[in-house]
Amino acid sequence: MNCRRKFLEGCLGAAGTALVASAVSVRVEARDTYQRPPEALGLLYDATLCIGCKACVAACKQANDNPAEFSTTDKLWDTPLDTSGYTFNIIKMYRSGTMATKDDETNGYAFMKTSCMHCADPSCVSACPVTAMTKDPKTGIVAYDAEACVGCRYCVVACPFGIPKYQYDSPTGKIGKCELCRHRYKDGHYSACAEVCPTGATLYGRTSDLLSEAKRRLALKPGSVTTYPRGNLSGGPDQSYEGYVGNYKQHIYGETEYGGTQVLKLSAVDFEKVGMPYLSPNSSASTSETIQHTLYGGLLAPFAVLGVMTYVAKRNVHHEDDAPADEPGKE
């Protein structure tokens, strides 16, 4: 009876420790969503200027040495239907009714570029357990290191845009995604999709410059004439030309979505209709990392209590079991 009383007293003491630990635990709040670096690089895609020529798709393939992908039996053209481990950039089409008018939601059609958005607070980087996905602190480019990758594909699941894709057909497969052609910078080049775009629908440059250009366009009167830059907005030769202003939705996609992205988009058709998901201003990475840290931190106290209870139980039960079987008064 005495041993049992000690055991119960020990458990009560451990439970008390747990209650005290819970009472003094630090209040947990979600960390802030990370912001774009001041010198972040990115793209501005203006769907009203896109003519659907897919020169950007072909240039991306060539710049990244990716093979052609076919969606027809005759295999006459490289016609990928979506991004893949070998297609990092694609132009998709919105269609309605008769498709009589470009950039019209009813009986019209429109284009939309799909590629990595280079989020300010990327989920793929947060989810990667081996830092194969990293975000450059200066340029903000979300880069991939195939040598570090273990093929878990957490990044594939984590991305809200469905961008990182795995090369399932290869025994040594790896993740494929846009890295803004960072491997071409040393040769004086920039993103191939922006270099070849004939209308300037895809512009390259510092995200701050691209955001200012996007706001300038939204302030213009639809149907008026303005000057559109092409190529590299933050440097390079002047390739600008005059064109008509589109009937923009007053929304710069990527300015605030998911905490902000380094790829910005303009459109005359509702963004959800052209395949861009609605996302809150807060990144999932900020929420998930807070939950993980809270769980890990909260688990310390229960483990400590469990250890104390185990010790108390082992000490008391051990003495009782070792007592002689014929000891008088033994229960």
Image (cartoon, rainbow, N blue to C red):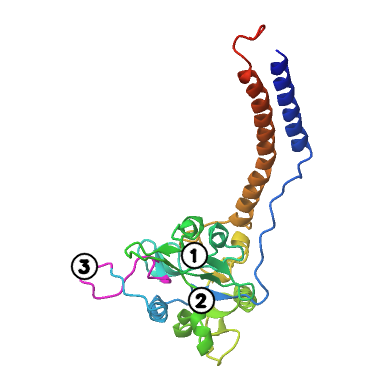
Which numbered dot is residue 269? 1
Question: Foreground mark, 1 or 2?
Answer: 2
Of labels 1 and 2, earlier in sequence is 2
Element marked by disc 2: loop
Residue 226 position, x and y percent, is 57, 83
Residue segment shown in magenta: 71-90
Who is closer to the viewer here, 321 or 50? Answer: 321
Q: Residues within 10 Å of mark 3 (few under 14, many from 20)?
A: few
Q: Specify the principal SS of the magenta part.
A: loop
Q: Which residue lies furthest to the bottom in this view?
A: 237
Q: Earlier in the sequence, mark 3 or mark 2?
A: 3
For the residue pair 118 and 147, the one nearer the viewer reads as: 147
Single out the residue that lies furthest toward the left.
74
Q: How far apart are marks 1 and 3 (CA)?
A: 32 Å
Q: Is residue 293 above or below residue 20?
A: below
Question: Which one is nearer the viewer's eye here, 311 or 127?
Answer: 311
Does residue 2 appear to the left or right of 101 in the view shown? right
**Pointer 2 residue:** 180
In this rendered view, identify the residue nearer to me: 330 or 270: 330
Point 60% across, 56% down: residue: 285
Q: Is mark 1 on a helix, strand or loop?
A: loop
The residues bearing labels 1 and 2 have C-alpha atoms spaced at a distance of 26 Å
Residue 110: % across, % down = 43, 68
Distance between the alpha carbons at the discs numbered 3 and 2? 32 Å
Type of amino acid under label 1:
Val
- Residue 230 x/y as whole percent: 52, 85
